[in-house]
Amino acid sequence: MENTTKKWLKIAAIVLAVLIVAMSATLGGMAAAHYAKVSEVESVQIEYNGEKLNIILMIGDGMGFNHVKAATAEYGDLFFATSADYAGSVTTFSRDVFGPTDSAAAATALASGTKTDNGKVGMYGGKDLMSTTELAMSLGMATGVIATEGVDGATPAGFSAHTSSRSNLDEILQDQLNSGIDLFFGSNSERYEPLKGQIEKSYTYVDAYSDIAGSSGKIFAAFDEIPLAADGESKPTLASLAVAALDILSKDADGFFLMIEESHIDKYSHNNQLADALEHVKAYDNAVKAVVEYAKEIGNTIVIVTADHETGGLQYNGETAAQLSDDMYTKGSHSKADVPFYVFGDVDYDFAQVTDNTLIAKLCQAILAA
Ligand SMILES: [Zn+2]
């Protein structure tokens, strides 16, 4: 890689301008509080070798820093994602700035680079927002969306649909089937089984893991569950599902964009079930490891690991594995805490320590369009 001409992508200034305008317009007197946070994104830059890059964006729904710390205490080894080439944090606030973001607005910000109202999917002000997935498709790249819940959840929907409410599940499915995205892998087969006929008009419908490899064309896979550990031929882990997706997407000479969500950290954190949440943090980290190893093997691939928001207001004060308890949660809903932002890849980074979630979309889109 030495002697390759380096390209600089200076996108921070754009992000800064967009956010200040958006926040002043809606907040009036409150603008100052967020201005301080937003201005910290100023020095974000990425340097890379100018070759076409693939991007894998991994989202741990509800995973805050304390989830990472508690998982590290529980499992005793270093949380793999923390070995990234860059580690920082991102702010998560939506346009509903007085409360925490929900997953729909956060996914929209991560996918499109635009803040929207809670509940909205890929839309703001009645208009569809272009997602990184759509940009990748317009460039001829392969694309995929993976979630451990049904792919109509708010996070995967933010990367594959446009609708005014996350509860418009039929509209989300219709958008996804019309999207042109190469693969959808998720669970909740109970919902999708009766819709098989509709899905099969544009996708090969798969409900067993062992059937993915032999499938041709666009694949819509719905499993009854995505377990923490491999379970025979039919049920994949998130890590094995990610690898199966990469086997398919990496064949495209134009490159690919893949979004992967571990959906259950949020669910268990809403219920303040720490042990269950941490098992899913661990499963997410296992998937990160598998994905990063794959990315290193094929080269020219950036892996971004983050979360959409923190759930449960989890506190961590150096507890050992034996001391971890559900009482470390302080609420049953999302918090406004910043979340982790890790980047793996053969590029030189000069990111601010604290950035904003919209910047991740702008970063992805700048890299793909470069
Ligand atoms: Zn949630």
Image (tube, helix red, strand yellow):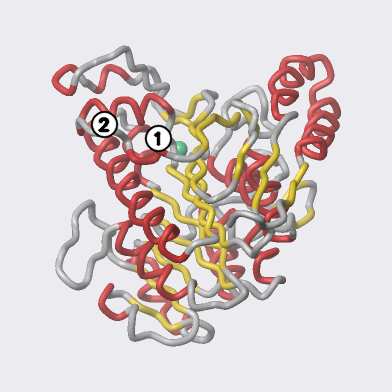
Q: Looking at the rendering, which quadrant does residue 24 occupy? A: top right
- Residue 237 location (% of width, % of height): 27, 59
Q: Is 58 situated above or below 241?
A: above
Mark-to-mark CA distance, 1 and 2:
24 Å
Between 180 and 143, which is closer to the camera in this rendering? 143
> Residue 307, image x and y in percent?
49, 39
**Relative horizontal placement of residue 86, taking residue 325 as reference (left or right):** right
Q: Which residue is mark 2?
A: 273
Specify the amino acid type for callout 2.
Gln
Mark 1 touching mark 2, by CB under 8 A? no
Mark 2 neighbour class, 10 Å CA radius: few under 14, some 14 to 19, many 20 or more: some
Q: Residue at x 37, y 56 (%)?
A: 293
Q: Earlier in the sequence, mark 1 or mark 2?
A: 1
Which SS class for mark 1?
helix
Disc 2 is placed on an element classified as loop
Q: Residue at the location (53% across, 75% down)?
A: 182
Q: Regarding ligand 1, which quadrant of the image does it lie in?
A: top left
Residue under the image location 48 percent in, 44 percent down = 305
Residue highlighted by disc 1: 82
Residue 65: which numbered mark, if any? none
